[in-house]
Amino acid sequence: MSYFGTDGIRGKFGEFPITPEFALKLGFAAGKVLKNATTKNKPIVVLGKDTRLSGYILESALQAGLNAAGVYVHLLGPLPTPAIAHLTRALHASLGIVISASHNAYFDNGIKFFSGDGKKLPNEIQDAINQELANDLYIEDTANLGKSVRVKDANGRYIEFCKSTFPYHYDLSRLKIVVDCANGSAYNVGPAVYRELGAKVITLHNEPNGLNINENCGSTHPESLQRAVIEHGADLGIAFDGDADRVMMVDQNGQLMTGDHILYILGTQTTQKPVGIVGTLMSNMALELALEKVNIPLLRANVGDRYVLQGLEEKGWVIGGEPSGHILTLDKSTTGDAIIASLQVLTVMIEQNKALHELIDGFTLLPNVLVNVSLTQMFDPYSIPALVTEFEKAEQQLKGRGRLLIRKSGTEPMIRVMVEGENLEEVTVLANHLADVIKANAI
């Protein structure tokens, strides 16, 4: 049995496997695998989290399991997921662990891993941890236990790293920026980066209480950011999700810019054009057509930043991402990073001396409707002949004018129905019809 999904282990806190008991055993299993895979006598694991209340409990349990396996733990506290990836490398750790459920509500939580080079954990290591979980937790010698220390300057280290990806000869002194921190892990470091680069920063949703993470705020709910940009007469707005690996941006007119807009800017508006860009099956057709005009290929990977990263590494490219705002710039960071991605867009603004909305002049996404079908029990929609027939009818209706994508969520019990085409009314009706059909045939 594999406990790992496309982005680590995730679920509702208090329900298996997101329980203190499992976290203790997971920490021990990961520690044992790490000890067996390294020549270091006391390998180091860095452990960070977002602002969920349940993170305290899972942090203690994981820490105890890792120490029991003879591993040293460096505690980072609340920090963005990409910060943990960076500090895993910077502190020469053998493993990084993040306690977060990303954009999910407060009652969910998750555990995901980074390898020593700050990248997604290889499948063979995940498999070894799964196998070790079947064994009992057994301490051979108390003298071989690990220790834990708290890294006091973790925030400052990450802030300086983010700033280093912005050209030294530029600054943000001409910009007023509204930053929506989603009451998540970037509530402190996010605004600090832009301020230290000279921007006037107005913060939203940067008072986490353990329960308000992603609550009507952040990249999944940018409405308050859109209003605030207009109310404050700001030049732009930036929204993170709970663990700050996703970013959405808002121009001075309050218009939302998704990951596709950001990829368009980084692909077509920079002085040095990329060789190619990796998107996903969810990437809007308009992005593909726009990149074609400037002879930049778009490779569509499966949904998930893990697969975007794989595509980039296979092609030797550096820029990729998802409409949801996972943006990877591998010449700057090893993983999707909301702060660093936004800084690359700000760099283009300064280089071109243009407002954010001017960078996407002439680029318009095709109407796209995404309907999430929540389930009590996950199933494969393509295993039911009646659903397959409906999907085929929809594809014929859209042929040559749009796209249909039906996929299972990798993080939640949900099937996502995406319909894209030239006419908003048509794709809306079609997406809702397919969602209703899936509900009617749910197991």
Image (cartoon, helix red, strand yellow):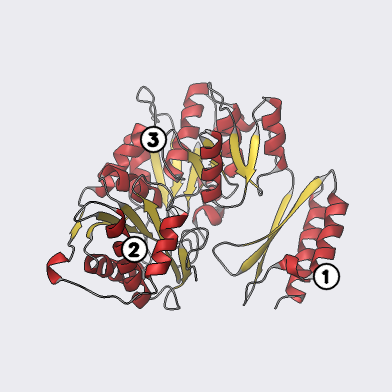
Q: In which quarter of the image is residue 208?
A: bottom left
Above or below residue 189? Residue 318 is: above
The residue indicated by pointer 1 is 386
Question: Cβ–Cβ below 8 Å for labels 2 and 1?
Answer: no
Q: Tell me which residue sits at (39%, 26%) in the image.
A: 167
The residue indicated by pointer 3 is 199
Tell me the SS state at disc 1: helix
| Closer to us: 343 or 290 | 290
Above or below residue 153? Residue 409 is: below
Say which of marks 3 and 2 sits in front.
2
Q: Residue 174 carries which label?
A: none
Q: Tell me which residue sits at (32%, 77%) in the image.
A: 136
| Closer to us: 267 or 256 | 267
Q: What residue type is labelled 1?
A: Ala
Q: Tell me which residue sits at (53%, 44%) in the image.
A: 310
Q: Decide if residue 186 is in sight here.
A: no
Say which of marks 2 and 1 sits in front.
2
Q: Which mark is residue 30?
A: 2
Q: Distance from label 3 to label 2 (Cα)? A: 42 Å
- Image coordinates of residue 396 in percent, x first then y, are 87, 53
- Among numbered discs 1 and 3, the one appearing first in the sequence: 3
Q: Residues within 10 Å of mark 3 (few under 14, many from 20)?
A: some
Q: Which amino acid does label 3 sit on?
A: Ala
Q: How crowded is mark 1: few (under 14 residues within 10 Å), some or many (20 or more)?
A: few
Tell me the SS state at disc 2: helix
